[in-house]
Structures are given as C-alpha cells and as structure tokens.
C-alpha cells in the first residue's frame, strides 16, 4: 500500500490552507455519522494527514474532532469555494464507503446538505449521482484486496483533485 500512497506525496509539500482544511474537516466528520468510527476510517484520516502534510495544529484539531461527532452540515457550510464544495462530494463518497458500507445515516446527512444547498445543488448533481455507487477500480487495474481497491480509488481521486488545484493556481 505504501508504494501507492507515494504517488501523491509530491502534491503535498505544504499544509492545507484554510479552505482545504475546512474541506477535510467536513469530510472527516462523516466518519461519525453512522454512530462509530471504523478502523478503516481512522486509518484513512491518518493517511490523509500524513500524505498532505497537515500542520501540527491541524493534526491536533482533527484528532480532537475524531473523538466526538461534529456537525457535518455546519462544517460543509464553512466551505466557501464552489470547487471545494464539489470536491467535498467526491471525497465524501470515499469516506462513506471506506468501511465498505453506505449507511442510512450517511445518506441522510448528504440529503440534509442537498436540501440546505437549495438551487445551488444543481451545480453538484454530477458528483451527487455517484454518491451511492460503491467506488471501483479502473478496468486495467487489479486489486489484491477490497482495502487496496478502495485505496487505489482514493489515490486516483486525490491526484485528480490536486492536479486540478495546481492548474487553477497557475491558470
């Protein structure tokens, strides 16, 4: 698994800025929605913080968040940029499927966010359509376990996002 994670380390030379940190906190809060934080969810959070060079203060805040359920809707509302809001739905899909199951409570919070968005929800319809579909691997890749399959999917999503972010910063 380590060699897969190495593919995206070069994208994370600095700690997440305020907006990216707001995005990650909202995504991580989904770990609590089903009533328990699975080991796979905890491991995902740890890997993300390591790979994306979270600052010590950010790590402490996230670790504090992981001890109590946060208000995902409020955390989502703190995400200001439309492309980060779209990315929330992509990363949320990964987080909610991390333990291998889509729980009713997880879909309920996504529905609450959709309702809160009002007409703005139409901007995210494409991302929302995929929310209830379990992540899979591209055809050319072969996973050796369900955990590796999930991790590869996460890596592909993160690479695409950070490449897009880099393009926005230079464009």
Image (cartoon, helix red, strand yellow):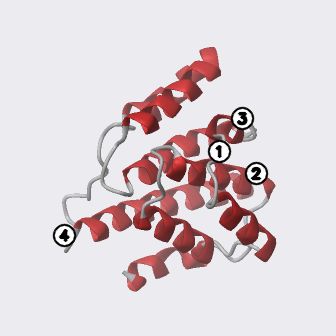
Q: Nearer the viewer, residue 118 or 97?
A: 97
Left or right, 19 with respect to 32, comes to right
For marks 4 and 2, the one nearer the N-term is: 2
Q: Label 1 neighbourhood size at 10 Å, few (<14), some (14-19), many (20+)?
A: some
Q: Secondary structure at mark 3?
A: helix
The picture places residue 104, in percent across and down from the top left corner, at 38, 34
Kindly report the distance in space between the C-alpha atoms of the residues bearing marks 3 and 2: 11 Å
Query: Which mark is nearer the camera, 4 or 3?
Result: 3
Kindly report the distance in space between the C-alpha atoms of the residues bearing marks 4 and 2: 35 Å
Left or right, 101 with respect to 53, comes to left
Q: Nearer the viewer, residue 55 or 137?
A: 55
- Give the number of the disc on residue 19: 2
Q: Which residue is mark 4?
A: 142
From the image, which quarter does the N terminus lie in? bottom left
Kindly report the distance in space between the C-alpha atoms of the residues bearing marks 4 and 3: 38 Å
Residue 91 to residue 147: above or below: above
Q: Secondary structure at mark 1?
A: helix
Query: Which residue appears at 67% of the width and 67% of the height?
Result: 63
Q: Quadrant of residue 76?
A: top right
Taking the image as drawn, is residue 171 in sight?
Answer: no
- Give the number of the disc on residue 77: 3
For marks 3 and 2, the one nearer the N-term is: 2
Q: Which residue is mark 1?
A: 84
The picture places residue 3, in percent across and down from the top left corner, at 40, 85
Q: Secondary structure at mark 4?
A: loop
Q: Are marks 3 and 2 in contact (CB under 8 Å)?
A: no
For marks 1 and 2, the one nearer the N-term is: 2
């Amino acid at each position: 698994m380590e060699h897969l994670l190495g593919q995206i380390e070069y994208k994370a030379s600095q700690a997440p800025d305020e907006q990216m940190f707001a995005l990650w906190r909202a995504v991580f809060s989904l770990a609590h929605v089903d009533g328990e934080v699975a080991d796979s969810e905890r491991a995902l959070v740890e890997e993300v913080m390591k790979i994306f060079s979270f600052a010590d203060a950010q790590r402490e805040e996230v670790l504090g968040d992981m001890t109590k359920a946060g208000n995902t809707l409020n955390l989502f509302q703190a995400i200001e940029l439309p492309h980060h809001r779209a990315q929330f739905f992509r990363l949320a899909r990964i987080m909610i499927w991390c333990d291998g199951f889509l729980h009713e409570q997880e879909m309920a919070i996504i529905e609450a966010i959709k309702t809160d968005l009002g007409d703005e929800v139409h901007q995210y319809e494409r991302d929302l359509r995929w929310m209830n579909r379990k992540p899979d691997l591209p055809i050319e890749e072969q996973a050796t376990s369900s955990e590796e399959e999930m991790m590869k999917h996460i890596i592909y999503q993160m690479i695409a996002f950070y490449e897009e972010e880099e393009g926005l910063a230079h464009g």
